[in-house]
Amino acid sequence: MWSGPRNISTAMMRSFGARPDTFVSDEPFYGAYLKETGDPQPMADAVIADMDCDWNSVAEAMRGECPDGSPIWYQKHMPHHMEGPVDIRDFPETRHAFLIRDPRRVAASYANKRSSIRPEHLGVTRQRLYFEMESDRLGYAPPVVDTSDILHNPGGLLAKLCERLGIEWDPTMLSWTKGPHPEDGIWGTHWYDKVNASTGFGSPPGGLPDLAPEFEEVAEACRADYEALATYRITA
């Protein structure tokens, strides 16, 4: 699953992780991204120290056998992390899906956690590029789901996503245990407070938020790429 940040990406990881047939991995390229870019993100030094930061080594692991032998391996990836020599083309045997969210909502969520962001932090431009690469490879569009659609109808959207991915729908995906989970990256102590308080998907969002000018500019820089992806989104 290729998702921008602040896109209910961790809730989606929780959802798939609730399945008895699924193993999940949390942003395996995050350490490599931080080491490559020096991006001053919260807990950056701790994340680098905790993770395999070699691009090719991580990619090889992600292409390998599922660590616990589960038949499904859900990998939560962030397109904006992919600043090294690895990209979506290095995973031709993987079924790829794309999780999107209106950039105004993403920027508003980021504003609560960071003092500044750039358009590339939302990852939408590379997300669109990867979508187009995968569409060209397959000859048809891979699945796209929008966070607002999921929050309006979690069961319906997830059932359709599972169908597109060629796996059985499992209602256990609608709930999970509260608190941190063992598979969470160590950055969860900073970023995952809301999802750690949850036991399922949240309420549908209201109207689009107002933004400070600097966040408004970032959101609008991502608008065209988001809307291009949204034309392919799965609907209930």
Image (cartoon, rainbow, N blue to C red):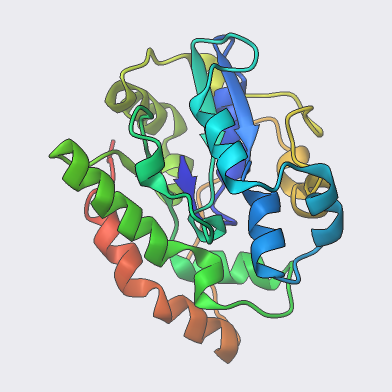
View extreme (bottom): residue: 213
Compared with 5, 171 (above or below) is above
Task: Tell me if 226 is positioned left or right of 25 in this view.
Answer: left
Compared with 96, 223 (above or below) is below
Task: Tell me if 124 is positioned left or right of 44 in this view.
Answer: left
Does residue 213 appear anywhere in the picture? yes
Q: Decide which of 62, 60 is in the foreground and name it.
A: 60
View extreme (left): residue: 139
* Rendered image quadrant of residue 144: top left
Residue under the point 82% across and 54% down:
190
Residue under the point 67% across and 73% down:
111
Residue under the point 57% across and 82% down:
215
Task: Tell me if 28 is positioned left or right of 83 in this view.
Answer: right
* Rendered image quadrant of residue 27: top right
Residue 20, image x, y percentages: 59, 9
Residue 143, image x, y percentages: 30, 38
Compared with 37, 148 (above or below) is above
Does residue 201 appear anywhere in the picture? no
Residue under the point 48% across and 63% down:
123
Report the quarter where the C terminus lies. Answer: top left
Task: Tell me if 133 is positioned left or right of 149 in this view.
Answer: left
Q: Decide which of 103, 98 is in the foreground and name it.
A: 98
Exactly how many numbered labels are in the figure? Answer: 0
